[in-house]
Image (tube, rainbow, N blue to C red):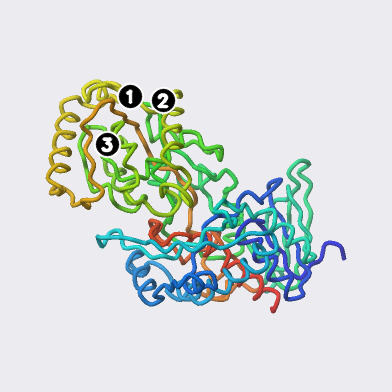
């Protein structure tokens, strides 16, 4: 029958694409659907691994036990440690498959990043990062290559096709799905002989689910970069008895510039076109609350900054810097996508250009004095002046005696012109989802697998809790693709 497949996968990006390839390589007849009209632009550019072929060539090997202990501590053991170890034991084979089957045939490479410098416990870092690149150190946007491979393996790919609900038999086993056509609304039922894999992402693009499942996240994030993330796959799993993570997990950037006077509790803009994006917000520059007071160490993982900000009035913060700061960005030694120059997103001149754009759109304020800057940012003038003076004194003495920021990340704000921006969180994705076991099978509240139902990527849970560990760069992409690959293999072998 045309509507019968061995394995059906909902969601055609990182987890789903890998699942489709893995199942097809096992000889399964595969259907891959996606609710949008394309997905190739979603494939992430940083992949985490521990002892991949690319890292071996570079003489890099991450201490697996140390990393697992770090992640357990980071998440306060609010995760399933078995899933952490499942990832650690399979991420290298996924990286190698990606390099051999997707990148090399198209001229791409996995470029290891060896520098993971840190001086304080809060910034403990691991050199897990593999940049998916071209030989000349450009970005390898490999999504089209993945889609080509999916089609080459004989997978049926249907876009504009949304998962509406799962179909079960009398025993509770999942036997298929019901979909709707994006334009016509027409419903279609598909049968799955071996299994259905949910790879539909999180729920950050669904306001009602954010208010219900992550109410603080709704307040502290002024933007959501995932309009596709409507939670539909998670909801479908819940309807057939699946368990779900009971506490939120998120990956949040401290890069959401908003107009002065924004009410963060009523500002949750969902748009992948990056309104208000301010990349330099991830730099550990001077940050103050809406009372003009410094409230913590800015040199922490970027989501920690947003967590601390959420305990301040108005769920917002202001970042303050000077023109002179712009020519010393390299000394801050940021990592991952915020690093200065490739494989970060911007170099110094590009950062300066972004500041000009944000001045033009009214997000960033520029002034000749701190007093004038305070007025433009609507911050208490006396407080901001006192805070900047105190900060400059500590920069001069080379020691942050208030909050312990490293010496190499102290830079004074003492030369006009001065700049400031009001910022909130920028939600990249929610990471809490359907509970799974180490075979990627979705489980119920008793821990028993729901027959023939699997999940991977941000629709799956048990792996993250609370904040994202950005000092393990590439972890979300690797988690999605590694677990997607495993889900495809297990489903095909069912």
- Quarter where residue 211 is shown: top left
In which quadrant will I find the C terminus?
A: bottom right
In which quadrant will I find the N terminus?
A: bottom right
- Quarter where residue 175 is shown: bottom right
Dot 1 or dot 3, earlier in sequence = 3
**Marks 1/2: CA distance?**
8 Å
Q: Which residue is mark 2?
A: 359
Classify 10 Å Cα crowding around label 3: few (below 14), some (14-19), many (20 and above).
few
Q: Position of residue 103 (x, y in %)?
A: 64, 62
- Name the residue located 50 percent from the left edge and 34 percent from the top edge: 275
Dot 1 or dot 2, earlier in sequence = 2
Q: Secondary structure at mark 2?
A: helix
- Quarter where residue 369 is shown: top left
Q: Position of residue 86 (x, y in %)?
A: 50, 75
Q: Which residue is mark 3?
A: 313
Dot 2 or dot 3, earlier in sequence = 3
Classify 10 Å Cα crowding around label 1: few (below 14), some (14-19), many (20 and above).
many
Task: Report whether residue 359 is seen.
Answer: yes
- Name the residue located 76 percent from the left edge and 66 percent from the top edge: 30
Q: Position of residue 392 (x, y in %)?
A: 16, 37
- Total of numbered circles in the picture? 3
Asked whether the beta carbons under mark 1 and mark 3 sit within 8 Å of each other, the answer is no
Front position among marks 1 and 3: 1
Asked whether the beta carbons under mark 2 and mark 3 sit within 8 Å of each other, the answer is no
Q: Which residue is mark 1?
A: 366
Furthest residue in direction right, as rendered: 1
């Amino acid at each position: 029958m045309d509507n019968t497949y061995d394995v059906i996968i909902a969601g055609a990006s990182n987890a789903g694409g890998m699942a489709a390839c893995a199942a097809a390589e096992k000889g399964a007849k595969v259907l891959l659907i996606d609710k949008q009209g394309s997905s190739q632009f979603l494939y992430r550019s940083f992949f985490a691994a521990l002892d991949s072929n690319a890292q071996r060539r570079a003489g890099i090997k991450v201490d697996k036990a140390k990393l697992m202990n770090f992640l357990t501590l980071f998440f306060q053991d609010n995760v399933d440690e078995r899933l952490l170890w499942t990832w650690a034991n399979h991420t290298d084979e996924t990286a190698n498959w990606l390099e051999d089957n997707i990148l090399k045939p198209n001229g791409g490479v996995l470029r290891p990043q060896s520098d993971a410098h840190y001086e304080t416990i809060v910034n403990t870092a691991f050199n897990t990062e593999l940049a998916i690149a071209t030989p000349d150190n450009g970005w390898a946007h490999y999504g089209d290559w993945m889609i080509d491979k999916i089609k080459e393996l004989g997978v049926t790919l249907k876009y504009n096709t949304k998962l509406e609900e799962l179909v079960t038999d009398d025993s509770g086993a999942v036997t298929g799905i019901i979909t709707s056509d994006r334009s016509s609304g027409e419903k279609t039922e598909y049968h799955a002989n071996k299994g259905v894999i949910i790879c539909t992402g999180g729920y950050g693009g669904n306001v009602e689910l954010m208010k219900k499942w992550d109410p603080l996240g709704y307040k502290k994030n002024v933007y959501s970069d995932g309009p596709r993330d409507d939670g539909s796959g998670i909801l479908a799993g819940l309807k057939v008895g699946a368990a779900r993570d009971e506490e939120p997990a998120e990956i949040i950037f401290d890069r959401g510039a908003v107009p002065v006077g924004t009410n963060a509790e009523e500002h949750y803009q969902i748009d992948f076109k990056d309104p208000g994006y301010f990349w330099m917000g991830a730099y550990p520059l001077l940050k103050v609350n809406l009372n003009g007071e410094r409230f913590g160490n800015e040199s922490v993982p970027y989501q920690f900054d947003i967590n601390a900000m959420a305990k301040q009035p108005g769920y917002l913060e202001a970042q303050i810097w000077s023109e002179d700061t712009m020519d010393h960005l390299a000394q801050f030694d940021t990592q991952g996508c915020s690093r200065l120059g490739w494989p970060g997103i911007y170099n110094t001149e590009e950062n300066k250009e972004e500041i000009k754009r944000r001045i033009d759109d009214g997000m960033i304020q520029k002034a000749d004095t701190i007093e004038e800057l305070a007025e433009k940012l609507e911050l208490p003038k006396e407080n901001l002046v006192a805070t900047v003076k105190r900060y400059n004194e500590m920069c001069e003495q080379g020691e942050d005696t208030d909050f312990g920021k490293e010496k190499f990340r102290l830079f004074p704000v003492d030369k006009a012109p001065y700049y400031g921006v009001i910022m909130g969180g920028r939600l990249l994705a929610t990471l809490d989802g359907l509970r799974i076991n180490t075979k990627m099978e979705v489980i119920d509240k008793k821990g028993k697998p729901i027959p023939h139902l699997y999940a991977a990527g941000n629709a799956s849970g048990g792996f993250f809790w609370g904040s994202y560990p950005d000092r393990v760069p590439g972890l979300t992409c690797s988690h999605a693709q590694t677990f997607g690959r495993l889900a495809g293999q297990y489903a095909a072998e069912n």
